[in-house]
Amino acid sequence: MADNVVDEKSELDLWMEYKKSRSPKIRENFIKQYAPLVRYVAGKVAMGLPQSVDYDDLVGFGVFGLIDAIDKFDPAKHVKFKTYAVTRIRGAIFDELRAIDWVPRSVRQKSREVEEAIVHLESKLGRQVSDKEIAGEMGMSEDDFNDTMLKISGTSVLSLNDVWYTGDENDKVSIVESIESPQAMNPDNLVERDAIKKVIIEALSELPDKEKKVLVLYYYEDLTLKEIGKVLEVTESRVSQLHTKAIARLRARLMNARKGIF
């Protein structure tokens, strides 16, 4: 136990020193220390992607996120670096995947159609809408809608890492950075620094219970879709559907917020 305390104190001292000196040697030390974290996140991301996406490429993309996390981490905020870095690593991987446009055009188009249907319905009704209502808006049965959501599930993870600007080009927030742990889900317990973040938090609180649980378990408890399926006692494909629906709802709410509807 004493050794662990010493190790933690030593690392904190290193962070404080790096924050002041920006020493390349300390930076390299942190990169080596947290390289396994990059491989872990890349492996988790790879499970939801086609086999044509190379794991080693994902690791390479993730290293950029790790470096960004090291440079921007503030030890004074009392947040564990590992927790902070996972979001940055995952975000960097998806940034690069977006850049190479790995998602088939037909799937991307269908994803846009779903979001547009939700945007239209919610702007008209002023509330979150059901699967049945979305399916009706798209002219399909609820079963066909669920099949469609399963097909586009690979793109919904990318959408969660999209950046939304709050007015100032240097002040931005992504959906994933606004998902809170279960203990902090109540908006009253959060310091809401801008309107966009408020919209995200409110939309998260209004999600159907299972969709909310999927997001928390996936992004903050770090479970795989298969593991989440065991927790919720549903199939892995059902978890994928729930995840996709949750992201579509969140993005639709943000689009309507930009129009001043919500």
Image (tube, grey):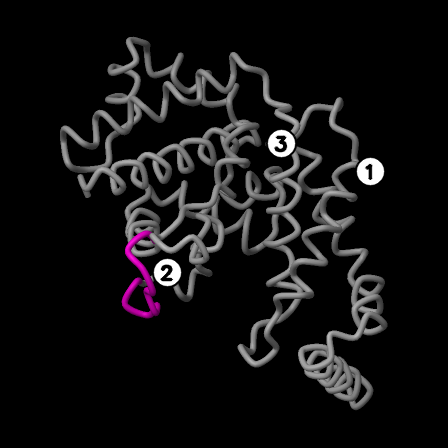
* Residue at position x 29%, y 39% in the image: 253
Numbered range of the magenta stretch? 187-196
Q: Please determine whether, in this image, residue 132 is positioned above or below residue 189.
A: above
- Label 1 SS: helix
Q: CA distance from mark 2 to mark 3?
A: 32 Å
Residue found 52% across the figure and 31% down from its top: 240
Q: Label 1 amino acid?
A: Asp
- Residue 21, position as x, y percentages in the image: 73, 80
Residue at which label 2 appears: 185
Judging depth in this view, the residue of 223 and 105 nearest the camera is 105
Numbered tag placed on residue 99 in the rendering = 3
- x then y, percent, for residue 172: 44, 54
Q: Secondary structure at mark 3?
A: helix
Q: Which residue is mark 1?
A: 56
The quadrant in which residue 31 appears is bottom right
Give the amino acid type for the residue marked by disc 3 in the picture.
Ala
Nearest the camera: 198 or 138? 198
Q: CA distance from mark 2 to mark 1?
A: 35 Å
In three-dimensional space, the C-alpha distance between marks 3 and 1, rounded to whole angstroms, equals 17 Å
Using residue 82 as the reference point, say whether residue 14 is left or right of it. Answer: right
In reply to whether residue 37 is colored magenta, the answer given is no
